[in-house]
Image (cartoon, grey):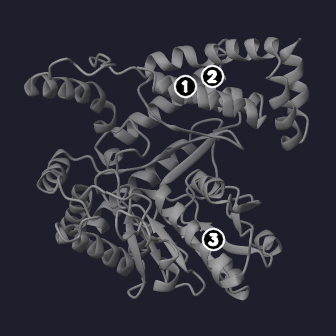
Amino acid sequence: MDLDRVQRMLSRLPSGLAATLHRGLKKLPPVARRMEREYDEVLGSMMEDLRPEGLPATTRLPERGRGRNEILDLLRSAMAAEEGRWTEGFASGAVYHGDPDHVGFLNAAYGLHSQSNPLHADLWPSTVRFEADIVSMTAHMLNGPDTVGTVTSGGTESILLAMKAYRDHARADRNIARPEMVIPVTAHAAFDKAAEYFGLVPVRVPVDEGFRADVAAIRKAVTRHTAVVVGSAPSFAHGVVDPIPDIAAVAAEGNIGMHVDACLGGFLLPWAEQLGHDVSPFDFRVEGVTSMSADTHKYGFAAKGTSVVLYRDRALRRHQYFTATDWPGGLYVSPTLAGSRPGGLSAACWAAMVATGERGYLDATRRILETAAAIKSGIGAIDGLRILGDPLWVIAFTSDHADIYRIMESMTARGWSLNGLQRPPAVHLAVTLRHTIDGVAERFLADLAEAAAEAADPSASERGAPLYGMAASFPVRGVVDDLLERYLDHLYDA
């Protein structure tokens, strides 16, 4: 069987039908063997690059525990091998502050509370106070002084919990058996995860030429089964803010919820507005916005593992909670997905916010946006490159002259870790404080100009970023799903 021919045929079919045919075909042994060979070829060299340096695999418990100093030496060695790229500003997003003194301060705060657990409020009431303060400070920053919320483990959990709350509200208060959520195609993948986990029906709507949600399409998509509509501030991929007031008006007309995903921008947009940038209202000032998510571990400069989900009222938040009243282990209640939670992370988050303060966030935002403006100007001056939409600091760009994934791989070879995008193919750089260090933006633009010129050269290697190249050339979901699942398998193979 000519698998290449089959792939081309499937790629011309509607996605649902193509995925169904793919599931049937891969049950045939010759097809399965050929596909496995292709997967191995795509993943082979990539996985070699992901093996940690100086950290041998430990596949079984040692008969006798190793010495603590020896273990700490191994941990330091692994850190030293990995920290160079992000400390020197080679990473898109990932580490949003990164100053050694700040990191040391967070580590000290975590260490003081490393044994605490908010699940046991009687033992560690301080951790609950930290979380209540984090919620309140975030709510005030987002112009919702009377709003409520919880601390979560990250943006994905914040989104999952909000969607779970809307599902349960729709079932309990509106008698909707299969609640729907209306989401722009640019909404974060966590909304798709919520749909899969909680049985919500995702109704996807297009975006306009500037990659902002199409309000007319949202209005058309809303039905009596809609539990929530979603907007991004900004979207992860293109860094543009959806028209939140217009979307919220549609939600309010239908008496349904409206969630603003401000995981990426919640701790930057308020200060950008104060600095005079054109920021359309996106928070609780907008009537119709009923919940928001904002990541403290991004531009809030906390340690990785915290975010905040906010609700306009307590009644909606209660649909997020889980209670068990007839369990033999006693009465059980949990505000978030996890039971036990690391109190040290909440302490470090509280410490980061209190130490930074309004002036600190304002100054950090000024530096980030000034650097982003310089980078946008520089990208615009590189022949063939084009910025998508009108972003403030998360800058997506593509190439009219070359394969953008070859440019991305060329940048990877120069040490950069950028985010690949698709539909359309593009790359983005999320500017952080690491990029505001003298010389980093200039180095990025110089390397990008060289990478773009190399990729446009007809004699250049045809090899591009393998995962995105395959997804772009063969957009049948089942095949790419298989590849990503094998990627995860490889990561966990010691």
Mark 3 or 1: in front is: 3
Residue 221 % position (x, y): 80, 70
Relative to 227, is 48 above or below? above
Q: Earlier in the sequence, mark 3 or mark 2?
A: 3
**How many other residues sit within 10 Å of disc 1, few (<14), some (14-19) or many (≥20)?**
many
* Picture quadrant of residue 250: bottom right
Closer to the camera, 35 or 172? 172
Q: Secondary structure at mark 3?
A: helix
Query: What residue does disc 1 label?
Result: 409
* Picture quadrant of residue 341: bottom left
Amino acid found under the numbered disc labelled 3: Arg
Say if residue 450 shows up in the picture: no
User: Residue extending furthest front?
Assistant: 328
Q: Is residue 320 left or right of residue 150?
A: right
Q: Secondary structure at mark 2?
A: loop
Query: What residue does disc 2 label?
Result: 464
Query: What residue does disc 3 label?
Result: 167
